[in-house]
Amino acid sequence: MEGKEAEFVLADKAYDSNNILDKIEEMGATAVIPPKSNRVVQREYDKEHYKDRNLVERFFCRLKQFRGIATRYCKRAEYFLEAVKLASCVILMS
């Protein structure tokens, strides 16, 4: 995360560690990570922003339904990016 800028950092419970939370705070961003159930002091997080993470996860699942993208059929980065753009357009149109 070094050298990155963000207003919010969304992640799942697996990333709920003090080291990661400290790095996010150093960035000046807000951590939107639900606390693990075994954390002694449960902390608050923005549940409305966390719902947006679900949209991104579902988009990537739909994107991986395209065989050429799931298997990285295009080995050159620029061709692969164009395939992702094309598949994204198809997803948005459906």
Image (cartoon, rainbow, N blue to C red):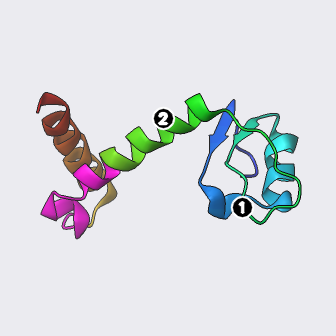
What crowding class fits label 2: few (fewer than 14 Cα within 10 Å), some (14-19), or many (20 or more)? few
Q: Quadrant of the C terminus?
A: top left
Residue 65: percent from the left, percent from the top?
18, 58
Disc marking residue 28 = none
Q: Look at the numbered discs 1 and 2 and tell me whether their residues touch, using CB distance below 8 Å.
A: no
| Magenta stretch in the rendered image | 60-74
Disc marking residue 37 = 1
Q: Nearer the viewer, residue 71 or 16?
A: 16
Of the residues tagged 1 and 2, which is closer to the observer?
1
The residue drawn where x is 88% and y is 60% is 40
The residue drawn where x is 60% and y is 50% is 11
Residue 35: percent from the left, percent from the top?
73, 53
Kind of residue indicated by mark 2: Asp
Q: CA distance from mark 1 to mark 2?
A: 21 Å
Residue 16: percent from the left, percent from the top?
73, 58
The residue drawn where x is 69% and y is 29% is 7
Residue 86 shown in magenta: no
Residue 43: percent from the left, percent from the top?
82, 45
Compared across the picture, whether 3 is left or right of 63 comes to right
Compared across the picture, whether 8 is left or right of 57 comes to right
Q: Secondary structure at mark 2?
A: helix
Residue 72 shown in magenta: yes
Disc marking residue 52 = 2
Kind of residue indicated by mark 1: Ser
Q: How many numbered circles does the render carry?
A: 2
The residue drawn where x is 33% and y is 57% is 77
Q: Nearer the viewer, residue 41 or 90?
A: 41
Q: Earlier in the sequence, mark 1 or mark 2?
A: 1
Q: Quadrant of residue 8?
A: top right
